[in-house]
Image (cartoon, rainbow, N blue to C red):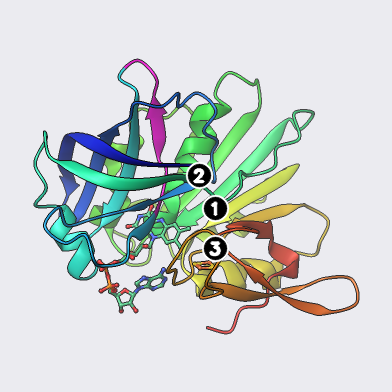
Amino acid sequence: MHFERCTVTANEEYGPGHWVISLRSGQDLSGIQAGEFLNLQCDPEDSWSLLRPLSILGVDLAANTMLVYYKHLGRMSRALSSVQAGEALNVLFPLGGRFPVDMSHRRIALIGGGVGLAPLLFLAKQLEDSGMEIDAYFGGASKPDLVLRMLEPYNCNMILSTDDGSHGYRGNCVDCYFDSGRSHDAIYTCGPNPMMNALKARLDGSVPCWASLEEYMACGVGACLGCATHIDNADKRANETVCKKGPVFDLSKVVFHH
Ligand SMILES: Cc1cc2nc3c(=O)[nH]c(=O)nc-3n(C[C@H](O)[C@H](O)[C@H](O)COP(=O)(O)OP(=O)(O)OC[C@H]3O[C@@H](n4cnc5c(N)ncnc54)[C@H](O)[C@@H]3O)c2cc1C
Ligand code: FES
């Protein structure tokens, strides 16, 4: 894990309120894996506020940069969009664990919505030469939420959905997945809790499903217990830290409360 002042090399709006920022590091980034995240100082003028957890969308080894996709939500994500190339931000990385991948699998599904697309797109990129068939079921409220420009560089079968029917399947990405009738060796998911809870309710346990959780976080390193979430183990329900033990968990064991 590194704590580094990274230089912003680009910070671009891909669609209304949807941004991608590139952070140049002096570290070797080749070991970073899909599912891992970083904690980022979003306001260069404010070094006192908590860093914000953000998934790693990708790594550009030639430029030695990490990419992050973020959405305008509150104070820090808005401050981040004002940061200019050339400015420097504190970054703690990489945090958490990766998505487990069984290389004998032939066809996998990615099911995600909102900023949950970030770790799934990184997984798609890391597996693009694996020979696996990758079906990506991505959903948004409306067409602009799908951020189509961001999806262009990825080499997987995109099956897109919108709640209002303005692009692709009309409905949410979970219904879209089940209506597709396709079968997969494993599923990877990230998105709002109600979406992942709906997916959990409809899976019968025959397909392994790995979920990346987004919890409120403070320290990001397992020290404050602020991100503890309920995970069902064989004989007991445990509180696990999403930042340290996760953020990726077996979806069938996650207990959603909201
Ligand atoms: C492991 C992990 C990976 C994440 N990856 C990304 C990512 O790739 N891109 C991205 O844009 N965001 C991601 N997030 C969420 C991101 O951390 C929050 O969007 C960010 O902290 C918002 O900060 P803010 O100051 O703009 O908003 P705040 O003012 O802190 O919050 C604005 C609103 O969003 C809600 N909110 C804030 N954080 C969360 C959260 N973690 N879960 C649910 N609701 C929340 C608050 O209740 C409030 O209503 C991730 C979170 C985690 C834990
Ligand atoms: S954020 Fe402190 S323990 Fe997870």
The residue shown at (55%, 67%) is 223
Point out the residue furthest to the bottom here: 257
Name the N-terminal-most of marks 1 and 2.
1
Q: Viewer-proximal residue, 41 or 235?
A: 41
- Residue toward you, 109 or 240: 240
State the image coordinates of residue 207 (x, y, percent, origin top left). 78, 52
Q: Name the residue that disc number 3 marks.
A: 213
Residue 111 - label = 1
Residue 17 belongs to magenta span: no
In the rendered view, does 82 fall on the left or right side of 200? left
Across and down, in percent, residue 213 comes to 54, 63
125 or 106, nearer to the observer: 125
Q: Which amino acid, by three-letter code, is at mark 2? A: Leu
Secondary structure of the residue carrying tag 1 is: strand
Pick whichever of labels 3 and 1 is earlier in the sequence: 1
Q: What residue does disc 2 label?
A: 120
Instruction: Judge whether 62 appears above or below 154 on screen.
Output: above
Mark toward the viewer: 3 or 2? 3
Q: Comparing marks 3 and 1, which lies closer to the viewer?
A: 3
Contact, CB < 8 Å: mark 1 with mark 2? yes
In this rendering, does residue 183 appear at all?
Answer: no
Left/right placement of residue 141 relative to residue 99 reads left
Q: Residues within 10 Å of mark 1 (few under 14, many from 20)?
A: many
> Residue 157: percent from the left, percent from the top?
51, 35
